[in-house]
Amino acid sequence: MTDHNRKGKPCVGLDIGTMTIVGSWTDEDGHTKSKQVRDVFIDLDIQIKKMVRLTNVSFLANPNRADQFVVVGDSALGFVNLFNRELRRPLSKGIISPGETDAQFVLVELIKNVLGEPITTGEHCYYSVPSSPIDDPDQDIVYHTEIFRRILNDLGYTGHPENEAMAVIYSQCSNENFSGLATSFGAGMVNVALAYQTVCGLSFAVSRGGDWVDKNAAKAMGISAARMCSIKEKGIDISKPVNREEEAIALYIRSLIKYCLENISIQFKKARSTIDLPEPIPFIISGGTSRAKGFLEVFKQEFEVIKKLGFPIEISEIRNATNPMTAVAEGLLILAKQEEAT
């Protein structure tokens, strides 16, 4: 399904998300380029493969099942409604799905689709990994980290893991000498990191994200999580919901923000004796869940509530990432360039 040969300078950044995989690189003119694909797939009976061949749909043979083939990425979304099926995901809660037997071969193809072939043998690729979630200690990121290192190495890259939220600081805080507090609101988790002049002071994750919002809002409304996700992604203003479904989404996004801020406050209060910032730092909001209209406004409202209770860090401003969907990949690209230069 690889549909492009990347041209430009070697070095790439790869954001591996629960819902979306994003690649970032520098083209021949020195401009930063990005490509993203949905990190989803659906399995279909081999009998309908002839019909699918007539379309532009991306599909693959299933090496684990001779009687099936799989449709991957954005193409899978249309088949979900047509066959009344649920999307399958290679990742769950930010890491490789432990029970998803087809995850690895699908991930290989999705990464090939985003990055294409390496320009040079052993081309440096920094890829995102989450922090261990403080509210789910059984989550194992070691296996996740090493599987992706192997996948990238097998594809001809040299893989370098890097914390997801730290990557946001690298792409968004150059004017502050790479000092900041960053949150990446993904589908599976929210990742958090604080850095002062590139040095990470503390990082962690919470095991709630966009999927948690969809699941709980759907349960409240008595509809499927996929349907709720579709409503959310069509675009709503969470500060001004217009119906019951949007109101449910808005309530759970607000709850997610509050939960995240409360845990940031707790974790940094615990580490206060080891973190001494000489000046206020920016608070950066990124990730797909943060794209909802009104998110920044609601975030600021909830931050003011937490701040009155004693937020342990002096914040200069709260701002969105320039592009919440590509901020991680672009930060990883910056690191890959530094690796290439050494």
Image (cartoon, grey):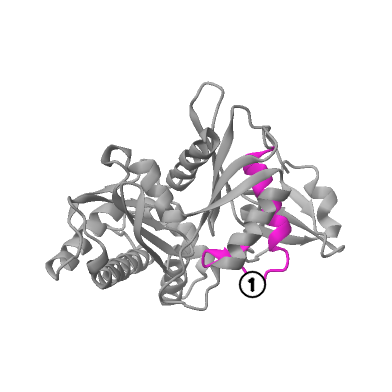
87 lies above or below 135: above
Q: Report if residue 292 is visible in the image.
A: no
Residue 30 at x, y = what percent?
A: 50, 24
Whether residue 308 is visible to the viewer of this picture, yes or no, is yes
Percent across and percent down for residue 50 are: 85, 49
**Crowd band around label 1 with a 10 angstrom C-alpha radius: few (<14), some (14–19), many (20+):** few
Q: Position of residue 81 (x, y in %)?
A: 62, 59
Q: Residue at x 67, y 32 (%)?
A: 119
Q: Is residue 179 left or right of residue 119?
A: left
Mark 1 is on which residue type?
Pro
* Residue placed most toward the observer, 274 or 324: 274
243 part of magenta stretch: no
- Give the residue drawn at x 35%, y 45%: 321
Q: Is residue 81 above or below residue 177?
A: below
Q: Residue at x 62, y 42 (%)?
A: 114
Q: Which residue is mark 1?
A: 98
Give the quadrant of residue 105.
Answer: bottom right
Residue most extreme to the left: 308
Describe residue 105's horizontal placement relative to residue 278 as left or right.
right
What residue sits 60% from the left and 55% below the top?
39
User: Which quadrant would the N terminus be assigned to in this image?
Assistant: top right
For label 1, the SS is loop
**Who is closer to the viewer here, 178 or 110?**
178
Furthest-front residue in this view: 342
Q: Which residues are magenta?
A: 89-117
Spot occupied by residue 75 in the image (x, y as percentages of width and height): 65, 49
Count of numbered marks: 1
Pick out the residue farthest to the top. Answer: 29
